[in-house]
Amino acid sequence: MCLLIATISRAKMLQVLANILILGLELLAMLAWWGWVVASWEVLSAGMEDATTYFAVALALATLVACVVMVCLRAASAAIDFPSENHSFALRIRFAVLVITLVFWGMMLTLVTQGEAGVFCLSVLGVVFMLFGALVAGELGVMSQRAQRTLPRTVLGRIFLTWFFPGAGLGYIFLCCLLVAAVSPWVLVFPLGLVSQMGWNDAERHAAWALLVCAYFVVFTGLTRLILLALPRRLKARIVVAFLMQLILVLAGIFLPNIFLLLIQDYSYYSSYGLIHTMDVVATLNHLMDTGITSEIAVTLVMVPLLGLLIFGLNLVQCCRDVLLVRVSMPDRVLEDQSTTKPEVSQVLASPDPLE
């Protein structure tokens, strides 16, 4: 994590301050972890709780931390390496592994709690995707000639692996599809009868929550990417700008409606949910949790996904340039060197492929 934060700036002083801050946070996290371990040991020694629960929680935390460390290390390596190298493939594979791990443990928690933790798990997925989406929106999609030699050669390879190529557009499409696949288990868990429906814990509310999580991600991340297209390609700290831009858009959707209502009501308190809060993530989800699918929420469930489809379509059209990246053949001198040093590799590269 320190390596990743330190790569944000080339200034040595900022790197040192970032490392000190993150090391302090890691120290606090370590103390909290050991405090939880000691407390768990005392509870288990007294026979107050089943040890299986604590072992499952420890295993879940260990696997999630391992996945996060893999993503951070690969992101830090990409930040200090040549920007024209193909780092997106390895980074997105690791993020997909992190998402699969989150979905697995989230579904286990949802099944154990009979669906009561479903909203919490969907919210965690939404936050993780918003953070990673803000970083992906700052990609340039520039690859060197040497990096383009590693691209897929076959038709099937280009169909299934194109979304792992560098570029904010391809990364945006990849994350949208991955998020839809990630929230699908929570939409299906109630109709399949795996958990009971009681009170606010019902299929409709979870399906609406999953739809809004996907729609808000598509809207805010897509808008961030479209805004960055209008900025110069040589913009310094582009990923940091993308992260701040997405944060500003989310905060604007939260605060602007409330500020407007305060102004038109002479600064009196206003607490009712209305259509003006459509882009307010916090107010919309809280209202959905408290009252269920009301008429205002029903309109939001139509407007936000439609806006998301529009923004998704614009980004899909704009990412056509990234799809045009194709595999580049090796120069003759490289083939000659490989024929003398590694003849078996040269023979594989020269063999015809019917799917090319």
Image (cartoon, rainbow, N blue to C red):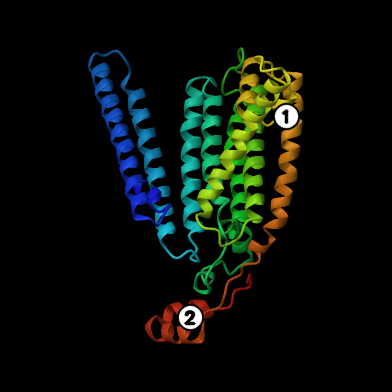
Q: Amino acid at mark 2?
A: Gln
Tell me the residue at 58%/42% (across/down): 246
278 relative to 15 in the view: left or right? right
Whether 77 is drawn above or below 294: the answer is: below
> Relative to 307, is 30 on the left or the right?
left
- Choose top left, top right, bottom left or bottom right for residue 234: bottom right
Mark 1 vs mark 2, CA separation in Å: 56 Å
In the image shown, does 37 or 51 lie closer to the viewer?
A: 37
User: Mark 2 falls on what kind of element?
Assistant: helix
Determine the residue positioned at 50% across, 49% down.
240
Q: Position of residue 110 (x, y in %)?
A: 51, 25
Q: Nearer the viewer, residue 15 or 347?
A: 15
The residue beneath circle 2 is 347
Residue 200 placement (x, y as % from top left): 61, 15
Q: Is residue 301 above or below residue 141?
A: above
Q: Secondary structure at mark 1?
A: helix
Crowding at label 1, few (<14), some or many (≥20) Cα neighbours within 10 Å? some
Mark 1 or 2, closer to the camera? 1
Q: Using residue 160 as the reference point, say whether residue 62 is left or right of it.
A: left
- Percent x, y for residue 186? 59, 30
Position of the C terminus by quadrant: bottom right
- Dot 2, how many residues are within 10 Å of its Cα: few (below 14), some (14-19), or many (20+)? few
Residue 138 higher or lower than 180, as above or below: below
Q: Amino acid at mark 1?
A: Leu
- Please state which of residues 214 and 207 is positioned toward the viewer in this rendering: 214
Q: Earlier in the sequence, mark 1 or mark 2?
A: 1
| Between 267 and 217, the one nearer to me in the picture | 267
> Residue tagged by mark 1?
301
